[in-house]
Image (cartoon, rainbow, N blue to C red):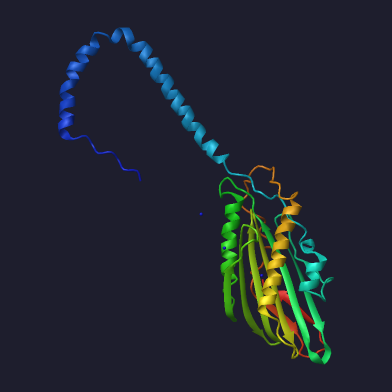
Amino acid sequence: MHRPAQRVGRAPRLTRILVSAAAVPVALAAAGCSSDSGSGSGSSADNAAQKGTAATSSASPSTSADAVKPAAYATLPAPCSVFSKKTLGELVPKGLKSAKSGKSDDAKDRSSCSWNSLDNKGVKGSQFRWLNVSLLRFDSDATRGEGNQLAQAYYDKQAKEAQTVTGATGARSEPVSGIGDASTAVRYDLKKKEGSFKQQTVVTRVENVVITLDYNGAGLAGDKAPSADDLTKAAEKAAKEAVAAVASANKDGSRATTAPSKSASPSKSASPSKSASPSASASSKPSASASATKKN
């Protein structure tokens, strides 16, 4: 194979300037009588006020930088342990032991795992299923912003990319309630030489983590194509379970205690691949096996 001039005050009118200028000699004469007695104390007060203002100004940038809230989640669950055996039995019934973990140089920032299943029914055909989950975690950064904001931007991008797959037909996208902080489900059909595959992609953000779940199925060698509605429901249920796994990996949702990161982003290698481009290779013969790999 798979979202956040000030106006300058008017210049004094000319008449006011002239009046003020005329009053200056009078003011100077009056001030000459008392300047010796009060100049010292007034100067000290002014200097103290200026120093106080300068101190406040210099402290502001530091206070602003420290205001970046730490990321909610500090790590990710083991990707191949995100789903229960029961859930895998429903989504990939013949592929419980087919889990394949994606490569990553930092599993606490990004990870993925995939499963595939082929239910061979002999002359009646076969049912093929493929499931993939990718997780990406964002740290808060004093320069780039809070982890939640960075995750939201990536979530928006993923949800859009899932709808722009070459060769996809009948694409539909809709928000899903009750899964994480934001969730979008995308589905479409994709024809391959082995048959017509029904693809479901659920992109979810929970705090500073984005979960992209891809699930597709096909009826091969003459077997009936699976119901897109059924596949979508199964994918959404699995996405909700993945959200719970993220919370559990972080002590049931407790916030990270580390300070905001000064690094730019999660490591560049092993980035979750684009969500929507399942390809499968399966022979039309009932006895053949099938496999699916996500397009990077």
- Give the tally of numbered discs: 0
Query: Residue 10 at x, y = what percent?
Result: 25, 39
Query: Residue 260 at x, y = what percent?
Result: 63, 44
Q: Residue furthest bottom?
A: 123
- Can you see residue 142? yes
- Can you see residue 1? no
For the C terminus, which image quadrant? Answer: bottom right
Specify whether 120 is left or right of 205: right
User: Is residue 211 or residue 25 the one in the foreground?
Assistant: 211
For the N terminus, which image quadrant? Answer: bottom right
The image quarter containing residue 209 is bottom right
The image quarter containing residue 227 is bottom right
The image quarter containing residue 8 is top left
Specify whether 164 is left or right of 179: left
In the displayed structure, would residue 166 be above or below residue 100?
Answer: below
Specify whether 15 is left or right of 208: left
Query: Residue 165 at x, y = what percent?
Result: 59, 76
In the displayed structure, would residue 61 be above or below residue 183?
Answer: above
In the displayed structure, would residue 136 be above or below residue 13?
Answer: below
Q: Residue at x 49, y 32 (%)?
A: 58
In the displayed structure, would residue 119 be above or below residue 100?
Answer: below
Q: Residue at x 60, y 71 (%)?
A: 162
Query: Residue 47 at x, y = what percent?
Result: 41, 20
